[in-house]
Image (cartoon, rainbow, N blue to C red):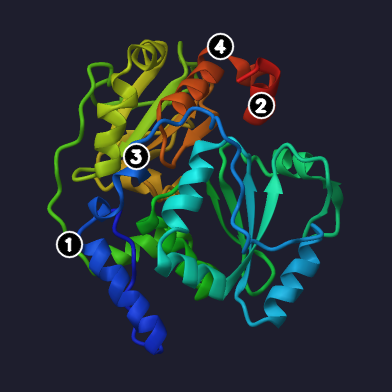
Amino acid sequence: MGEHSFLFRTDYGLKQLTWLICLLFSLSAGAVTDPDEAFEFRDFPLTEPLDHPDWFKESFLDLREDFEEAIDAGRKGIIVYFGQRRCAYCKLLMKVNFGMEDINTYTRLNFDIIPVDIWGVDELTDMQGQTLTEREFSVRENTNFTPSLIFYGSNGKEALRLRGYYPPYKFRAALEYVADNHYQKETFSEYLERAEGALAFEPGELNDEDFFSPPPYALDRSHRPGEQPLAVFFEQGSCHACDVLHSQPMEESTIRDLFGQFENIQLDYHAETPVITPSGDRTTARDWARTLNLFYTPSVVFFDEQGREIIRVDSVVQFYRLRNVLNYISSRGYQTEPNYQKWRVKSGF
């Protein structure tokens, strides 16, 4: 089920219980309860620049001060938002997710959001007291895809990191995971895994592609390098986001031609399918996904010829972003510039 992600608890107050009931109602119907716009959209750069909501904090970009002020105000922590003004995915976060009253209210009640421009030159002081520009901070934190969000929980430590856009049902779970301090005892993927015990769904067939290699999945590249980069698709049945990936961006000839330059395999996120990983470990598809700390389907994890992870796309993706990532890998851009964000600037994408 994997995409349905809220836990039933017995220690909720009235407001929290109301919030939980609403969430379970929507999650029980799956991702289809989210607007189609959350998955089906054009992701080319916006023609009109985007402004973040006026309720985001007007910060002096000292994250330690922002955190202390949030805690003093009774909040559960802060969220550092990394965005850019012509980002279509950032617009979805603002319009779709924060456009929902329950998400908007819950976020503002529990967190202050600190906006950071990934191209900005203003000075920022991080949680360790180091001073650097917004752009330097964004590069250091590997915010390859905007919007990226770093959650700092009530203990002042990083609790969760989201790179890219996630639809409302997943975003709701992330908010509660941090606000209720689940991060102090389990990973986000473990948290979501426990939720699967509360809701049961029939498995469905995976979307097939003619360029997927058949089993057995002996992917070891630690002793003998591969001839091409490797793309590993982690998916599941009855997954609306997976259906969109295969019926939209992956139907484009440009995307298919680029994937033709990779070794491609597809794994069921929940299956016990035997796998030998690129580093030579024997495991199962399910356990490997947990080791990689994946919590979204579809996720595509890319490895180089020696079996080292290059980058992963583990959030909502459409044509423009996917094409850029594939160009980065197929051109071997990662060999001269391991930071994808820097490569994009140099390459003009």
Q: Nearer the viewer, residue 74 or 94?
A: 94
The disc label shown at residue 331, or none: 4
Residue occupied by mark 2: 338
Residue 218 lies left or right of residue 74; in this view the side is: left
Residue occupied by mark 1: 200
| Classed neighbour count for the residue bearing mark 4: other residues with Cα under 10 Å, few (<14), some (14–19), many (≥20) | few
Residue occupied by mark 3: 298
Residue at 67 percent across and 65 percent down: it is 157
Residue 271 lies left or right of residue 151; in this view the side is: left
Query: How far across and down, in percent of the image, does residue 199 sit?
Result: 21, 65
Residue at 46 percent across and 51 percent down: it is 95
Q: Secondary structure at mark 2?
A: loop
Residue 119 lies left or right of residue 107; in this view the side is: right
Quadrant including the N terminus: bottom left
Tell me if I can see residue 101 in this picture: yes
Query: How far across and down, in percent of the image, does residue 321 sit?
Result: 48, 28
Residue at 41 percent across and 63 percent down: it is 172
Residue type at tag 3: Pro
Query: Mark 1 or mark 3: which comes first in sequence?
Result: 1
Q: Compared to 332, does 25 lie above or below?
A: below
Q: Secondary structure at mark 3?
A: loop
Determine whether label 1 and label 4 are within 8 Å by CB: no
Query: How far across and down, in percent of the image, does residue 66 sit?
Result: 75, 67
